[in-house]
Amino acid sequence: MKVLQQVYVSQPGARQDVVPLATLNPQLVLVFAGPQQLANPQLHQQLRSALPDAVLAGCSTAGEICAQGVLENSIVITAVRFESDARVAAARAEVRAMEDSYAAGRRLGELLEPTGLRAILLFGKGVEINGSALIDGLVQVIGANIPITGGLGGDNGAFHSTYTLTTDGVSRSAVVAVGLYGEHLAVGHGSYGGWSAFGPVRRVTRCDGNILYELDGAPALQVYKNYLGEYARDLPASGLLFPFEMLREDQSSVGLIRTILGIDEEQGSLILAGDIDPNGFLRLMHTTTDGLVDGAEEAARRTLASMTAERGDGLALLVSCVGRKLVMGDQVEEEVESVTAQLGADVTVTGFYSYGEISPFASATDCKLHNQTMTITLLGERP
């Protein structure tokens, strides 16, 4: 595997020189950028002109991750050329409304060739989408044995307009699935949070998919505001600091966290990033910078442990939650540094801060939408 990365830090609308990437003749080009930078139609035009044979995929972000660290409103372009039999194909679908998420996932799955499929990278819009339903629809078609990783795009915490890049162009409503094929392709993945639960357990008494209406029979928004106190005036942004831990009917942990992406004052409801169990319980969570850095390091260890074969140079896709970035502030690069230290110098790092992370549980291929985690996908080639 050969990887070439270029990083551009410039004003929106500025022309970028992407021609040097063409020397690699890449099969796959991943692009993560600030919303204004990605929305600029010139960027896609330049990429298609210089790299006509490459599959393009990526999204806008709440912060870009690259070999230089963590950036904002930059453009990080990573070109990949496989040296074995590995190949790449992509599928695109539109999510016109949140209720269309499951069907969009199915459409993606139906467009991907199943023969030889080893893994899927999934990127999409970060607002007006049910990430859990999107994944469920995709899994329904491709089966539960194919690992799916990736994340939902961001717009620097505004939760207004996110963008997805595909080979066909840039869209505010698109999702893209990149199918990875080949016997010599090596794929590892890991995910971990670093958050701690606090406060009483609350029963979910009314919800619909990813919309939470009631906790213990009371309007969910009011219950949540009571906990947040002075932070409530900054909702929904402050909700990133206090996500929910999902608990089963017996109040044991599911292993998933749900972030608040929006509120509905009229309905008294909370809009979460993914589905919740209508028969389950929720409990608030909080964390510290040290907790998140330790969590990122654990995600890297799990990723390395999941690699079942030797590999050469690799590419690591890091998708971390915007809520983690808000908690860590100026120390946000520490979690990326902890990951790169674990993965080693032969791994090129790319990625972004997201509105939802996509990864299997541990070493299994039971793919879920995660929130407030560091998720890592490690790609390599077997000798």
Image (cartoon, rainbow, N blue to C red):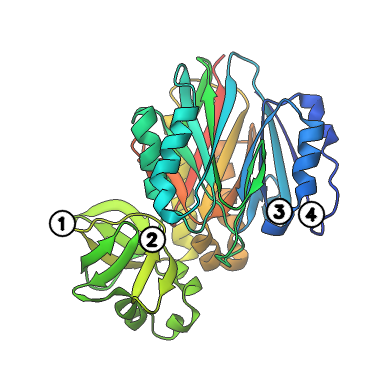
* Residue 194 point in image, percent of width and height: 41, 57
Residue bearing the label numbered 4: 9
| Residue identified by numbered label 2 | 195
| Front one among 378 and 32 | 32
- Work out whether mark 4 precedes mark 2 in sequence or the reverse, and give the earlier one: 4
Q: How far apart are marks 3 and 4 (CA)?
A: 15 Å
Apparent side of residue 204 relative to residue 263 in the rendered image (left or right): left
* Mark 4 Cα shell of 10 Å, populated few (<14), some (14-19), many (≥20): some
Residue 368, compared with residue 29, is above or below; it is: below
Q: Position of residue 241 (x, y in %)?
A: 45, 69
- CA separation in Å, label 1 and label 2: 21 Å
Q: Position of residue 235 (x, y in %)?
A: 47, 76
Instruction: Tell me the residue at 37%/35% (across/down).
Output: 139
**Cα separation between marks 2 and 3:** 33 Å
The numbered disc on residue 249 is 1
Give the image location of residue 228, x and y in percent: 38, 80
Badge 4 marks a residue whose secondary structure is loop
Mark toward the start of the polypeptide (1 vs 2): 2
Q: How far apart are marks 4 and 1 (CA)?
A: 49 Å
Judged from the image, the secondary structure of the residue bearing numbered disc 3 is helix
Asked if residue 112 can be seen in this view, the reply is yes
- Mark 1 vs mark 3, foreground winner is 3
Callout 2: helix, strand or loop? loop
Earlier residue among tags 4 and 1: 4
From the viewer's perspective, is residue 244 above or below residue 382? below
Instruction: Give the labeled residue for mark 3.
Output: 39
Q: Distance between the residues labelled 1 and 3?
A: 44 Å
Please state which amino acid type lies under the numbered disc 2: Trp
Dot in front, 3 or 4: 3
